Amino acid sequence: MSQKHKKLCDLQAKRREDNFREKNRRWDSYKDISEYQKGCFDFNGCVSPWTKSARNLNANFMLVAQDWASDDYIKGLRVSDPISSLGYNPELRSNKTIQKYLFRFLGISFEETYATNAFVFVKPGDISAQILTSFFSYSVNTYLKQEIEIIAAPHVLCLGMKTYRALAKLHKAPQPSVDRSSLARFQDVAGITYYCLPHPGGHGTASVGGNRNVEGLWEQLGGITT
């Protein structure tokens, strides 16, 4: 077992044992991924299930989405579903888009990256439900920060404004401007660069004015990093 894998297993154990419901009554309706279907989605060494199919511990690129799933969504899953073995739904349009952009603009596969989520717990409600800002910040500061330090990928791709803003606030970096035609980025004291990319779903694409603008941001990313 490598030191990185051991540290990730320790961080996963910390998440499982987190008594977050006792810290804030407003977090009572949130759950840990290990509470579902006898822990079948809580893969060994994965702080977030999305890591299952993209856990290159020496990756150059780390993908950070907002959150993995919601209570309603997980309750509708079956053990036989692909997500139970892969950690993601390969037929979901947003997942296909990420893989397409990674190959087209960076020349890499999804499996060559390290993928995780800023929010490592399970939110109540449906997949589009909002996460309490206080709990989202808690997850970023307690888990994502440490996960980024463990992997130490030189490039962290934030898939969504909320994730980027939380990390910028954590590192006391400038918040992104309203001009979304230019790729926002900052570098932390360890030399890791964070990039602000829209979520590959419909809302994220619309937030920057459509597919052409999304592709323009990814093209800028490719020009900087390759």
Image (cartoon, helix red, strand yellow):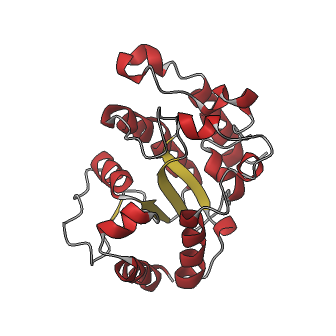
Does 19 appear above or below 64? above
Q: Give coordinates of residue 41: x percent, y percent.
A: 70, 39
Name the residue located 60 percent from the left edge and 69 percent from the top edge: 96
**Above-or-below relation of 104 to 177:** below
Which residue is at 56% across, 51% downward? 116
Which of the two residues, 93 or 98, is positioned nearer the viewer here? 93
Q: Quadrant of residue 161?
A: bottom left
Q: Quadrant of residue 48?
A: top right
Q: Is residue 132 left or right of residue 21?
A: left
User: On the image, which quarter does residue 216 sit in?
Assistant: bottom left
- Residue 198 seen from this side: no
The residue positioned farthest toward the front in the image shown: 76
| Residue at (64% x, 42% y) in the render | 8
Is residue 205 found left or right of 30 in the rendered image?
left
x, y percent for residue 36: 67, 29
Residue 28 percent across, percent down from the top left: 44, 19
Quarter of the image with the N terminus is top right
